[in-house]
């Protein structure tokens, strides 16, 4: 098992290097003139252009710029954003907020999605099942920015239950509405997935055997059915954590949460290569880590799966 | 938009009642706070204003509206502007000159920075030298290029050191007096001094005054001499808090206890916060909300003309548009009123001159017949000048997609198709910067859109940079020696009033040559909460914080 984990971690290092190179190359190709992007529609003075070009090595070829970036990364200097702030500071402030939002969202998905899905699966065709089906279809059909703005208008502006925008003084409470909006799509999927999985397993041979043995219904559902039904759901939730963080880009914008999404958006707009590459690379690492965790969880849920 | 109107109709009256209750309880809370902290009515009110994350908070490095809004609270400029937008001394007792080349600036005595340092001639000289010093690469560096000695601080090659560290044109006379020598006489220099770039800096701002080095930490909590001082430091992407500066020496004192600048990523969120009573001042209501803003806000919705103009430019290297009659026909086929009304919902107004209505010397309709909507005449003129074949079969309008320009470009194209009988397409570019790069390479983009915000309220600021042969933003390559000499004469004129006569003659040349078509000027479209009143905007699209008052009870 530990050899397996070690191998996976080594693979992650390789994946990380590859991603930085690819994203850096893409940003380099896309970026026409970061200094003009920074200045907006105002002209930039020749002496300022000369100074900034020198500071950010903008006149060097791609591989040299990438070399400067990697050198900084290895020595712990992530460099500065094109407007002059240390990237490390920017990310250190932004990441915890995005992680909080994504985890809260995931918690909402798990707390509502799994019991709801199990219940719907047990009472297939019942009222609850029909309602959640309709709900899921509606949610899946609406883009998240519409969902976010409607939720903001109705629950924050009109009803006043929440603040329309991020308010750090409220602590975790300020993330509730954005987390619900962010999690709704995953919630709908988790509900459907759990429901189908449970419904399928209820018809499995081992359930009939268990019933024949005289096990209680609670034990059959709670231990046997649930454990077997959760495998696809866990896969989904694991990859979804990464997805939630990326989905947060839209949600953070609507609710003005100063997280990673806003920084990424800003970086792309200003053609700020180092900021975008660092942010995306960290997203990739999170994706890889959650995938590893999912794979390990498999073994715990289903002892037949063993990692050599 | 449709989902929004659905939501509105669907929820109706019941919710409005709920909203009223919320507002009522907010009002009680606010009154409680105000009374508690000072005991004198609403004077304890801290108001909030929405901004985007500023790029920098050093005066000579803040060339965008967000940083300028914050610095306007923390600093007071040398001049303010009267009702005709002419400069009047504010932090100075006199700004005088006999030849428009050597200017003597005398400061008002008794002013101090927030940290207790007195404001002296050195505060200005040091700040301006740092701003003009090439290696600092400040955004407003070019504002100092009129001052003698500027080239010595700004070598063309970044790898060579500047030959001087101080502007030779800045000379201290005594503690409160300094002399500014310009390279060329410039009659409107006084008008420039209200701009953010010309604010002073305390010694505390510098790590090394001799080398023009400003401490990196300074902009985290800038120290000014203005009506408000920093409360804590700049909380990036979140908040910048200020409170009243008790020793503020200016003639008008703030009527509120402080201003909290709340930083937003998107403008619609600001507007939602305004509606929910979480934000007091919104300086630009987004176009998405314009259709409902008037009814949402009632008498808390305001508009005032701004300095921003939008024009349609024709690159001179593009032969297709080289005939003035083709450009005139295009101009006459555009119904400016229809576009400002239906596309911009009156957040912009038709422009038929080459300068914004807010600068001294503006005259209505200098563009003449060319900017009057006249489809029949436009069509006749277009056909006489060669018709569709002359423009290569279709008219192209290039624009940057990140600025929300698609709707009006499409509308303009539809008007041209209808009125001139020629095909017209928009030519989307990812960013304005990309558009400029293609222009530089002389790629045939077609006509292209452009916007302009003035730096200081002088006609010349719309003419020199945009149409002068060496103008910094003359991306289309217009060059007319007669125009250049009129501008130069204007700059050398003995008084601002005399200079305007030359500038107006120069503007008349533009009307004849039509290198660009004036399209629209922006309206400041702003709103405020029920907690405040007397909200107005200044020339630089900033809310005049010194005029804002707590709303009188009973509203």
Image (cartoon, coloured by chain):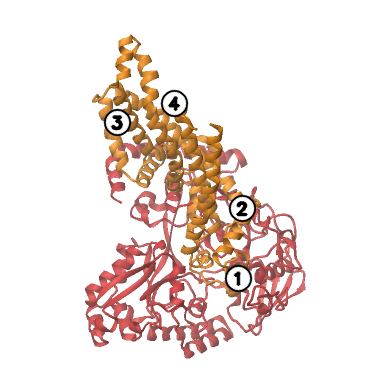
4 or 1: mark nearer the eye: 4
Residue with the mark numbered 1 = A48
Foreground pick, B271 / B244: B271
Which dot marks residue A73?
2
Chain A shade:
orange
Specify whether residue B481 is in view.
yes
Query: Looking at the image, which residue is at 44% across and 36% down?
Result: A238
Query: Looking at the image, which residue is at 48% across and 32% down?
Result: A307
Foreground pick, A79 / A292: A292
Give the mark nearest the N terminus, 3 or 2.
2
Query: Looking at the image, which residue is at 37% across and 36% down?
Result: B18
Which dot marks residue A132?
3
Q: Chain of mark 1?
A: A
Give the mark nearest the N terminus, 4 or 3.
3
Instruction: Assign a secondary structure to mark 1.
Output: helix
Badge 4 density bin: few <14, some 14–19, many ≥20, Cα 10 Å: some
Write down which chain is painted red. B
Query: Looking at the image, which residue is at 44% across and 34% down?
Result: A106
Spatial separation of the CA atoms under disc 4 and disc 2: 38 Å
Spatial separation of the CA atoms under disc 3 and disc 1: 59 Å
Asked if marks 3 and 2 fall on the same chain, the answer is: yes
Badge 2 density bin: few <14, some 14–19, many ≥20, Cα 10 Å: few
Relative image position of residue A161 (x, y in whole percent): 42, 35
Q: Chain of mark 2?
A: A
Give the mark nearest the N terminus, 2 or 1.
1
Tell me whether circle 3 and circle 1 mark residues in contact (CB < 8 Å).
no
The correct choice, above or below, for A158 with respect to B306 in the image is above
């Amino acid at each position: 098992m530990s050899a397996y984990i070690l191998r996976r971690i080594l693979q992650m290092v390789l994946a990380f290097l590859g991603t930085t190179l690819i994203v850096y190359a893409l940003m380099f190709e896309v970026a026409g003139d970061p200094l003009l992007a920074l200045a907006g529609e105002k002209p930039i003075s020749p002496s300022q252009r000369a100074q900034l070009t020198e500071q950010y090595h903008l006149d060097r070829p791609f591989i040299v710029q990438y070399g400067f970036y990697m050198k900084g990364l290895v020595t712990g200097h992530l460099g500065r954003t094109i407007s002059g702030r240390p990237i490390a500071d920017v990310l250190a402030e932004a990441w915890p907020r995005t992680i909080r939002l994504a985890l809260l969202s995931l918690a909402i998905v798990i707390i509502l999605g799994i019991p709801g899905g199990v219940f719907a699966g047990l009472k297939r065709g019942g009222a609850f099942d029909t309602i959640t089906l309709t709900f899921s279809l509606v949610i899946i059909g609406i883009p998240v920015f519409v969902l976010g703005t409607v939720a903001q208008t109705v629950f924050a502006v009109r009803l006043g239950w929440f603040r329309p925008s991020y308010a750090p003084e409220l602590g975790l409470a300020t993330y509730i509405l954005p987390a619900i909006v962010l999690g709704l799509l995953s919630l709908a999927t988790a509900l459907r997935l759990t429901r189908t999985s449970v419904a399928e397993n209820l018809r499995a041979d081992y359930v009939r055997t268990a019933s024949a043995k005289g096990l209680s219904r609670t034990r059959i559902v709670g231990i046997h059915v649930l454990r077997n039904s959760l495998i696809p759901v866990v896969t989904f939730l694991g990859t979804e954590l990464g997805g939630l963080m990326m989905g947060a880009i839209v949600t953070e914008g609507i609710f003005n949460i100063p997280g990673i999404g806003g920084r990424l958006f800003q970086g792309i707009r200003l053609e700020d290569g180092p900021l975008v590459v660092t942010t995306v690379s960290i997203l990739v690492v999170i994706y890889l880590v959650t995938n590893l965790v999912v794979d390990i969880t498999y073994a715990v849920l289903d002892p037949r799966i063993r990692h050599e | 938009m449709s989902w929004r109107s659905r939501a509105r109709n669907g929820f109706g009256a019941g919710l409005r009642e709920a909203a009223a209750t919320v507002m009522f309880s907010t009002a009680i809370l606010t009154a409680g706070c105000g009374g508690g902290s000072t005991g004198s009515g609403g004077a304890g009110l801290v108001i909030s204003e929405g901004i985007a994350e500023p790029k920098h908070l050093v005066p000579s490095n803040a060339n965008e509206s967000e940083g300028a809004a914050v610095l306007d609270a923390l600093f007071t400029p040398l001049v303010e502007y009267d009702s005709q937008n002419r400069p009047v001394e504010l932090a100075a007792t006199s700004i005088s000159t006999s030849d428009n080349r050597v200017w003597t600036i005398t400061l008002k005595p008794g002013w101090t920075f927030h940290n207790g340092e007195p404001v002296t001639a050195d505060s200005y000289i040091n700040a301006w030298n740092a701003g003009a010093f090439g290696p600092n690469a400040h955004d407003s560096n070019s504002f100092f290029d009129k001052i003698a000695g500027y080239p010595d601080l700004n070598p063309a090659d970044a790898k060579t050191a500047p030959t001087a560290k101080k502007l030779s044109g800045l000379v201290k006379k005594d503690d409160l007096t300094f002399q500014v020598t310009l390279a060329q006489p410039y009659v409107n220099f006084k008008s420039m001094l209200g701009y953010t770039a010309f604010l002073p800096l305390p010694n505390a701002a510098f790590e090394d005054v001799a080398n023009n080095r400003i401490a990196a930490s300074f902009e985290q909590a800038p120290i000014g001499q203005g009506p408000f001082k920093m409360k804590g430091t700049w909380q990036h992407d979140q908040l910048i808090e200020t409170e009243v500066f008790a020793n503020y020496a200016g003639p008008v004192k703030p009527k509120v206890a402080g201003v909290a600048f709340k930083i937003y990523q998107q403008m619609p969120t600001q507007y939602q916060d305004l509606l929910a009573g979480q934000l007091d001042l919104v300086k630009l209501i987004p176009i998405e909300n314009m259709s409902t803003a008037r009814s949402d806000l009632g008498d808390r919705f305001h508009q005032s003309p701004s300095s921003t103009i939008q024009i349609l430019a024709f690159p001179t290297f593009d032969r297709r548009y080289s005939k003035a009659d083709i450009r005139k026909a295009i101009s006459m086929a555009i119904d400016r009123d229809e576009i400002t009304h239906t596309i911009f919902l009156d957040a912009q107004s038709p422009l038929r001159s080459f300068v914004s209505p807010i600068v001294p010397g503006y005259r209505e309709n200098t563009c003449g017949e060319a900017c009057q909507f006249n489809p029949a005449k436009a069509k006749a003129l277009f056909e006489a000048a060669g018709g569709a074949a002359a423009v290569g079969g279709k008219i192209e309008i290039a624009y940057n997609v990140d600025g929300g320009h698609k709707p009006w470009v499409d509308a303009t194209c539809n008007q041209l198709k209808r009125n001139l009988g020629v095909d017209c397409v928009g030519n989307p570019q990812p960013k304005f910067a990309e558009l400029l790069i293609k222009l530089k390479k002389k790629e045939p983009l077609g006509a292209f859109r452009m916007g302009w915000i003035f730096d200081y309220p002088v006609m010349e600021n719309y003419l020199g940079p945009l149409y002068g042969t060496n103008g910094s933003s003359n991306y289309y390559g217009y060059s007319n020696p007669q125009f250049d000499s009129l501008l130069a004469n204007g700059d050398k004129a003995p008084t601002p009033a005399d200079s305007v006569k030359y500038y107006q003659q120069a503007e008349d040349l533009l009307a004849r040559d039509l290198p660009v078509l004036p399209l629209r000027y922006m309206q400041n479209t702003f709103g405020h909460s029920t907690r405040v009143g007397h909200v107005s905007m200044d020339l630089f699209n900033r809310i005049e914080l010194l005029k804002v008052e707590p709303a009188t009870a009973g509203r």
